[in-house]
Image (spheres, helix red, strand yellow):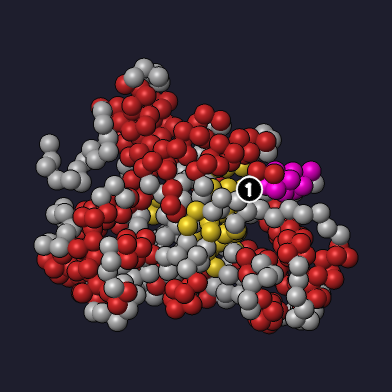
Amino acid sequence: MSTHFIHDNFLLENKYAEELYHNYSKNQPIIDYHNHLSPQHIAENTIFDNITKVWINGDHYKWRAMRTLGINEQFITGNATDKDKFLQWGKTVPYTMRNPLYHWTHLELARYFDIYDLLNEKSAESIYEQASAKVNSAEFSTQNLLKKVNAKLVCTTEDPIDDLAYHKQLASSNFGVKVSTAFRPDKAILISNDGYNAYIDTLGEVAGVSINTYSDLQSALKNRIEYFHANGSRLSDHGLEHIYFENFTESEINTIFKKKRENKELSSEEALKFQSAVLLFLSETYHEFGWVQQFHLGALRNNNARMHRVLGPDTGWDSIGDYSQAQKLSAFLNALDSKDKLTKTIIYNLNPADNEVMATMIGNFNDGSVKGKVQFGSGWWFLDQKDGMTKQLNALSNMGLISCFVGMLTDSRSFLSFPRHEYFRRILCNLLGDEIQRGELPNDMEWIGKMVADISYNNAKEYFNF
């Protein structure tokens, strides 16, 4: 048996788990249906200068850990050299034990660089040199990194104003991995945000619509959905605290939007009504185009106002929120279903206290028309770890059909994050293997193996139908 920390049977605790992983899951292709990779880097087949640029820059998971250890911001997002930033990360890694970063770090070093040494303060310089020498070569270009992990589809996330130039470039190239995008129109929904009117002006310019009325806004958004659809998009994505659902009239929404365009202050009730109206309009439009809609719910963002002013969003100052989720989500899905305009839907939950809420909610709207039509998405962000994924799998199993689950995604900005699929698959296989060993599941490898292969790849392939 290997003496390396990362070895063939990492996280696999018995022979059944090993058989499920190695025979049914390990070699399945990857469909990464939601991430934040740069389409420009993919289209231009970027080669990074060193390991820091591809592995640490932009990774707010690592940044939070380094700050917690007391490392100065100079070595995180500041002007320190790339090597010095890596050395500080290497110093941090041993302190991340029992955080998923420890597992991810060593899986990524093993899978991309064949480095099995533990990363720590002593080994950091040598690992920096080894990894950087490989990164700075054609073999480690962005496109080759995606091929290396057997990715079949990667789906980035773009704002409605994006021209999708890099997606067009990729569509006309001979790159063997399909690259699509998810439409993320949150800036058009969140009417109380700073800069909302300036954003709407830009949206109007891009859509060729002068946006003066709410009807104009609807026209502009539908124009951009048509544009994304014509360029291969079949998904939307929303990152919201919770689903909005307030009763409103068309007259009220027209008045609210007019007030905003005249730079008048809105009440919180007016904002919620408007957000409800736009979200329903968008979801009905997604149904019209046959898209999958995704809702990432429950993040409390930008908690540290001082650092948000300095570094901006998505730099490591977010946490789990404790919003009320069930009632509005139910009313929203019901409103769409009542009109037969509920499209395929994936709901991601950030608060583990709401796992069972989400697992039971999806069953209310799985109407037999599509296998797994409404999905409880995989553990994400703070729940993207062994315990979080296991709890999501258990809640879904106990209250739904785990066999219909569309599986894992990276939700990452890093081209080295794809071993998260392996991590998920190992956890899934170990969970099932453990229950076979205890006699809670039959030793029916043909059927359980098929279920593992479906969750790893086949269900997503069927569900997204790219």
Measuring from the top left, give residue 138's x and y in whole percent.
25, 71
Specify whether residue 333 is painted magenta.
yes
Amino acid identity at mark 1: Ser
Vertical comparison of 380 with 61: above or below: above
**Picture quarter containing residue 133?**
bottom left
**Is 137 on the left or on the right of 174, as rendered?**
left
Q: Which SS type dominates the magenta stretch?
A: helix
**Is 405 on the left or on the right of 293, as rendered?**
left
Q: Which residues are magenta?
A: 328-338
Specify whether residue 224 is painted magenta.
no
Q: Residue at x 77, y 78 (%)?
A: 264
**Is 459 on the left or on the right of 433, as rendered?**
right
Measuring from the top left, give residue 223's x and y in whole percent.
71, 70
**Residue 203 shows up from this direction:** no
Q: Which residue in the structure is indicated by mark 1? A: 324
Q: Secondary structure at mark 1?
A: loop
